[in-house]
Image (spheres, grey):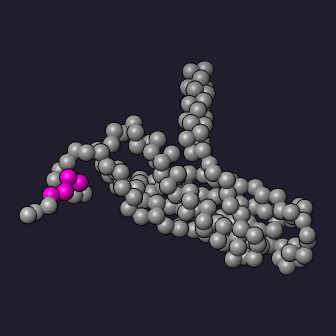
Amino acid sequence: MTEQSSAPQDGIDGSKEPGFRIQRIYLKDLSLEQPNAPQILMVASEPQLQVEVDVAVMPLSEGIFEVTLSSTITAKVETKVLFLIEAKQSGIFEFSNIPVEQIDPMLGIACPTILYPYLRSNIADIISRAGFQPIHLNEINFHGMYEHRLMQAQQAAAEESKGTLSN
């Protein structure tokens, strides 16, 4: 008796089923600086954190994209930098038979949502390896971040079209 699987075999059968696949997730870049050590380590004060997160997308080939989630974390005690971390967590994502209008939201929302736990873990790990209590970054609403970017792009396009109309 032969078993037959109803799962597609990675496009071998020429199926037109929509597909989304994670090809690879990797740490692209990670750096830690403690510019004021060791003197600042003697200061007994709670650090103030500043966290920045950004998403970048780069097409690699037809239907394949690299999405990079970048973060910069700056911890300051008083006015001096305790530590500075820059991290880039990336992934290669493959889309097949997905309508073009759905790919951009997936690249801006779904892919960063997949990458973020890896980024958080790597940042917490490097902070603890540097001798500090681990800092766990808060959850991020990538949908809200994506909508905000769309609004900014629309406003910029509207301002640009006003500028060309008045010339």
* Residue 149 in view (yes/no): no
Question: Looking at the image, which residue is at 30% across and 45% down?
Answer: 18
The one nearer the camera, 62 or 103, is 103
> Image quarter for residue 21?
bottom left
Q: Residue furthest front?
A: 1
Magenta part mainly helix, strand or loop? Answer: loop
Q: Residue furthest bottom?
A: 38
In front of the other: 160 or 139: 139
> Could you tell me which quadrant the C terminus lies in?
top right
Query: Residue at 33% of width from left, 42% of height from top?
Result: 98
Residue 43 vs residue 87: left or right? right
Residue 136 in the image: x percent, y percent? 68, 61
* Magenta run includes residue 6: yes
In front: 158, or 108?
108
Instruction: Classify residue 145 as left or right of residue 22.
Output: right
Residue that protrudes farthest toward the top in the picture: 166
Residue 140 visible in image: yes
Examine the rendered structure and indicate whether residue 96 appears above or below residue 118: above
Tell me which residue sits at (40%, 39%) in the image: 102
Total count of labels = 0
108 sits to left or right of 3: right
Q: What percent of the width, then of the height, locates residue 75?
A: 78, 62
Tell me if residue 55 is in the magenta stretch.
no
Q: Position of residue 46 (x, y in %)?
A: 86, 63
- Stretch of the chain drawn in magenta: 4-8
Residue 38 sits above or below residue 139 on the image: below
- List x then y, in percent, for residue 111: 48, 51
Tell me the quarter of the image containing the N terminus.
bottom left
